Image (cartoon, helix red, strand yellow):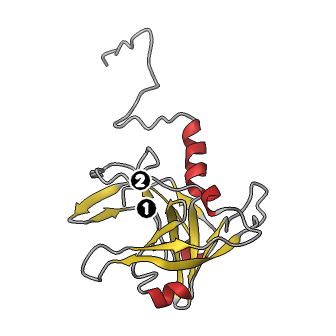
Amino acid sequence: LTQISLPDVVEFEKIIGINNLKQISWIQNGIDASRSVCRILTPTGLGTGFLVGSNLLLTNNHVIPSQNIAEESLAEFNYQQDSTGKHATSYRYRLNTSTFKTSHSNQLDYTIVGVSPEQGFPDIGSWGHLDINIFANPMPGEHVAIIQHPNGGLKQIVMTANQVIGNLDHRLHYTTDTMPGSSGSPVFNDLWQVVA
């Protein structure tokens, strides 16, 4: 047998592939971004949406396909667990269809609708809003995170096993877990910008 000599110093720590280290503030930035994500309650089902302006909500067309559905729908903010595992106080706002724009089924799948203030509730602007990076072109292998209301339940996030695997025309294909009710959720890049 030949003896193999090892170097005096063996380095066990290393970056393998992409550097996935993040500043701890990254978590707080994600929590801040999550405030503007809400549960959508419609007469035909549940979905997710998010604020893109002080009183503008973005979701999927297949969640809110028409003004008639929007008039009967609600946006519920803060529907989530608090740090003790209890239900946080949530707030349901009516939608304001004086601002309404939606795509057709063969185009991008979106609806933008206003949110009406409710007396005694936090100001809609207090929930913040998300920035959409219209120049983003997520590439295969890039990580994404989705804040969502799966099955119309409490707000959740996926932060593991979440990679882009394809960019098909105007659709993004990723491995992140979602469920019915997740439709309309923001897909974030590592800078907490909405990319899909």
Q: In this view, does 108 lie to the left or right of 9?
A: left
- Residue at left offset 38%, top offset 62%: 175
Q: Is residue 133 above or below residue 55?
A: above
Which mark is drawn over residue 101? none
Q: How many labels does the image show?
A: 2
- Which residue is label 2 attached to? 144
Question: Along the line of sight, which residue is nearer the eye, 34 or 118?
Answer: 118
Say which residue appears at 34% left-offset and 75% top-offset: 109
Look at the image and tell me whether residue 180 can be seen.
no
The picture quadrant where one finds residue 150 is bottom right
Q: In which quarter of the image is residue 120?
A: bottom right
**SS of the residue at dot 2?**
loop
Q: Residue at x 30, y 63 (%)?
A: 172
Which amino acid does the dot numbered 1 rest on?
Thr
Q: Earlier in the sequence, mark 1 or mark 2?
A: 2
Instruction: Identify the residue under disc 1.
Output: 176
Q: Residue at x 56, y 63 (%)?
A: 37
x and y, in percent, of residue 36 in the image: 57, 60
Q: Which sits in the foreground, 166 or 187?
A: 187
Q: Is residue 132 left or right of residue 45?
A: left
Where residue 184 sits: x, y (%)?
A: 45, 71
Q: Quadrant for the C terminus, please.
A: bottom left
Q: In which quarter of the image is the N terminus?
A: top left
Mark 1 touches mark 2? (CB < 8 Å):
yes
CA gap, disc 1 and disc 2: 8 Å
Q: Is disc 2 surrounded by few (<14), some (14 to 19) or many (20+) residues within 10 Å?
A: many
